Amino acid sequence: MEEKNSSPFVMDVVEIDHFLSNPPQGFSVEHRAAYRLVKSDPTHSCVFIDEFQSSKGKVIFCQSPGRKIKVRNLGDYTNLRNQLLSKRIYVLVSACATITGKAQEKKRINDPALGLYVVVINGCHPMIRWEMEKGLDSTISSVAGESYTVNVDIRDAVQACVGEKFRILIDGEKVKPSWKDTHFTINYHSDALFDFSYWFGLSKREIKISYCGR
């Protein structure tokens, strides 16, 4: 997950067991009795991964606020914005598929156990930064100080990064995955007394990241 040739790093999709066995620079994995504890350097990374159960036990990312980030004031928002535009972003996604044939007898349709992957995005890459800034600016201007929920969706970028030929081998069958949980969520709660738009679910926004450098 380093820069290749002279081109700046854009993004990567790494299978979770490989990520934990070979943590990237700034990460370390400690093996405890009942779980694995993943530590990261917050000065260089934004980790938005909830604790989860893997085939080898529970995994906890201790510097992560989870997939949902709470923002309570303009200072919190500004700080989060600066981090998203200057650091590498880490999100855990699920590879799923509608399975047919022999594999369907042994796996549930759309089973997340097909694979968990860590997506790494370079938030300071010019194109990623542009897409993120554009989406954040549009969100802030449209809610005008009200509470809001915004999903930062990276599905298009993930699909483009792995390519159309990417397959997962299940019981001898090559399965083309679809991707789920390809987002992290910013929840902003204002002090507005009558925040009707938020109460009725009308202040939901979405930012799409589609650039992957390929």
Image: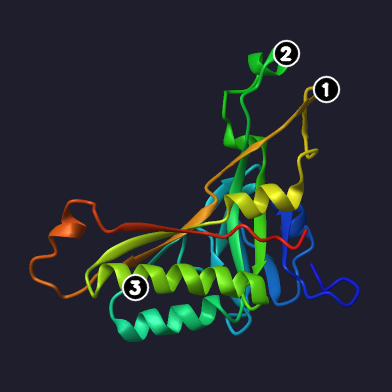
Of the two numbered discs 2 and 1 on the same chain, state the one appearing first in sequence.
2
Say if mark 2 contacts mark 1, CB within 8 Å: yes
**Amino acid at dot 1:** Gly
Q: Residue 152 at what x, y percent from top left? A: 48, 60
Front residue (pair 18, 138): 138
Q: In this view, does 142 lie above or below 196?
A: below
Residue at 75 percent of width and 69 percent of height: 24
Q: Which of marks 1 and 3 is in front?
A: 3
Marker disc for residue 140? 3
Q: How far apart are marks 2 and 1 (CA)?
A: 9 Å
Q: How far apart are marks 2 and 3 (CA)?
A: 49 Å
Q: Name the residue under label 2.
A: 102
> Quarter-wise, where is residue 123 in the image?
bottom right
**Amino acid at dot 2:** Lys
Q: Residue 164 at what x, y percent from top left? A: 76, 40
Q: Helix, strand or loop at disc 3?
A: helix
